[in-house]
């Protein structure tokens, strides 16, 4: 029986996809085969030697020691796109909040409590201080056209906005989902110069930290409104604060507020509600469970952040899964070991990603010698071997 540990409350509709006859699920369990979590910070906990996979029911994996997992041959999954609609809807809300002074007007309206019959008149008199702009006809710059960015771009275009997209790494899958009416920006600089609103939909990496800084803000229109529903570290706080003070940036809407941004003027701070919908939590849990099952039971890797995407149909026999450093002559060495053991390969898939390669090998026989795993692990560069029976 496989053992699954949950480090956060995971939606039961997702967990019920684990067959009870084959899986044991607990929040505290020794030697788990897999861990499913949401925001639990794993950096300071010891990774058990039994651990095969970690699945994040969400997109970001900053709370998981990914490099350490890779070294130990632990596959880390996330669930891209499962919460995309929830985030998209909040981004659209952010557009409206930033253009119509809705947040400020709500706070002001509460100050009228106790004024009795004077309230209607005070409302009519005071509303002019919250006059805003319509988003129709304005230009939205979308940086990052992944699962969320494409949905945001399409929705904004449908609302009558001119939408400029920029993503040099856009996948074919997402390109096919993008509305033909969304325009490609020839460069990031041209997008920044033309946008009335800017939304960030890119991951937080070492190379994207402080992505929006003084240099980029200088290229933007006076009074631009910036939406950040991706990660807080994408914006340089010091440069943002200066731009908000001068009015270069009229509004900053963020789903990732910190102490500094909360103190800045013209900041609309939302407490990380992007994926906080019942539908998003269910979708993420279901996807995480399906990916864990597919890996544990079949060795297939879908939506991993540290291993190559690798899927191959089973042939009914034994399957061997091998992870190795992406260096020359590895496939030949693996094949030689199998040949020496009189093991015939019926099907094989090799995929690589950066410095890592994965091999999925189906063999004809249903029984193999127990020493085969040791012989494969002895190959220099191999750091993970799994033997999956029928």
Image (cartoon, grey):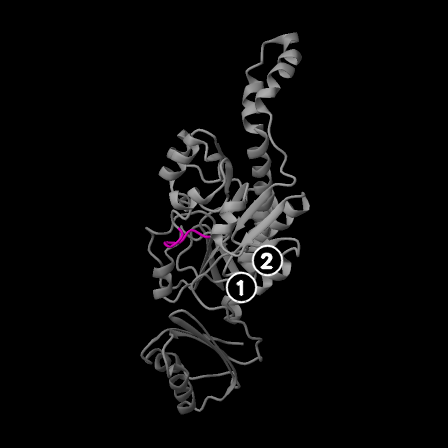
Percent of width and height locating residue 100: 59, 30
Residue in front for this viewpoint, 81 or 186: 186
Residue stretch rendered in magenta on the structure: 203-208
The residue indicated by pointer 2 is 17
**Helix, strand or loop for disc 1:** helix
* Disc 2: CA contacts within 10 A as few (<14), some (14-19) or many (>=20): some
The residue indicated by pointer 1 is 293
Compared with 105, 72 (above or below) is below
- Which residue is painted at 55% across and 75% down in the image? 312
Compared with 383, 266 (above or below) is above
Residue 215, picture quadrant: top left
Percent of width and height locating residue 221: 50, 40
Q: Are the residues flagged by discs 1 and 2 in contact, CB closer than 8 Å? A: yes
**Helix, strand or loop for disc 2:** loop
Q: Is residue 205 magenta?
A: yes
Residue in front for this viewpoint, 95 or 35: 95
Mark 1 vs mark 2, CA separation in Å: 9 Å
Question: Left or right: 137 with respect to 187?
Answer: right
- Which residue is painted at 39% across and 57% down in the image? 30
- The answer, for residue 153, to whether it is visible in the render is yes
Residue in front for this viewpoint, 18 or 380: 380
The mark that comes first in sequence, 1 or 2, is 2
Percent of width and height locating residue 360: 48, 77
Label for residue 342?
none
Residue in front for this viewpoint, 292 or 250: 250
- Which residue is painted at 65% across and 55% down in the image? 179
Percent of width and height locating residue 341: 41, 89
- The answer, for residue 82, to whether it is visible in the render is no
């Amino acid at each position: 029986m496989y053992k699954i540990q949950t480090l956060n409350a995971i939606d039961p509709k997702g967990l019920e996809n684990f067959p009870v006859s084959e899986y044991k699920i607990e929040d505290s369990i020794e030697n788990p085969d897999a861990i499913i979590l949401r925001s639990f910070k794993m950096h300071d906990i010891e990774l058990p030697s039994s651990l095969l996979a970690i699945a994040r029911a969400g997109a970001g994996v900053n709370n998981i020691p990914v490099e350490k997992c890779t070294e130990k041959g632990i596959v880390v999954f996330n669930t891209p796109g499962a919460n995309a609609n929830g985030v998209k809807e909040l981004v659209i809300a952010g557009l409206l909040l930033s253009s119509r002074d809705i947040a400020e007007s709500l706070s002001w309206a509460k100050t009228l409590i106790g004024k009795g019959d004077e309230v209607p008149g005070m409302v009519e008199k005071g509303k002019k201080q919250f006059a805003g702009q319509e988003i129709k006809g304005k230009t939205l710059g979308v940086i990052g056209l992944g699962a969320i960015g494409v949905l945001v771009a399409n929705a904004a275009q449908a609302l009558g906005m001119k939408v400029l997209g920029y993503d040099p790494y856009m996948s074919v899958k997402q390109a096919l989902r993008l509305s033909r009416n969304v325009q490609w920006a020839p460069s990031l600089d041209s997008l920044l110069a033309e946008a009335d609103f800017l939304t960030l939909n890119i991951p937080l990496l070492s190379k994207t930290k402080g992505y929006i800084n003084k240099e980029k803000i200088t290229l933007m229109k006076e009074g631009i409104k910036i939406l950040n529903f991706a990660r807080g570290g994408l914006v340089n706080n010091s440069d943002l604060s200066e731009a908000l003070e001068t009015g270069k940036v009229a509004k900053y809407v963020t789903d990732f507020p910190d102490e500094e941004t909360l103190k800045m003027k013209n900041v609309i701070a939302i407490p990380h509600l992007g994926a906080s919908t019942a539908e998003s939590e269910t979708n993420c849990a279901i996807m995480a469970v399906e990916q864990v099952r597919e890996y544990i039971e079949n060795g297939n890797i879908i939506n991993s952040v540290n291993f190559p995407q690798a899927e191959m149909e089973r042939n009914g026999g034994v399957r061997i899964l091998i992870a190795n450093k992406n260096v020359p002559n590895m496939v030949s060495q693996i094949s030689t070991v199998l040949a020496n053991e009189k093991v015939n390969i019926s099907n094989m898939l090799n995929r690589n990603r950066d410095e890592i390669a994965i091999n999925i090998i189906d063999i004809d026989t249903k029984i193999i010698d127990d020493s085969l795993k040791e012989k494969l692990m002895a190959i220099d560069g191999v750091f993970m071997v799994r033997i999956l029976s029928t």
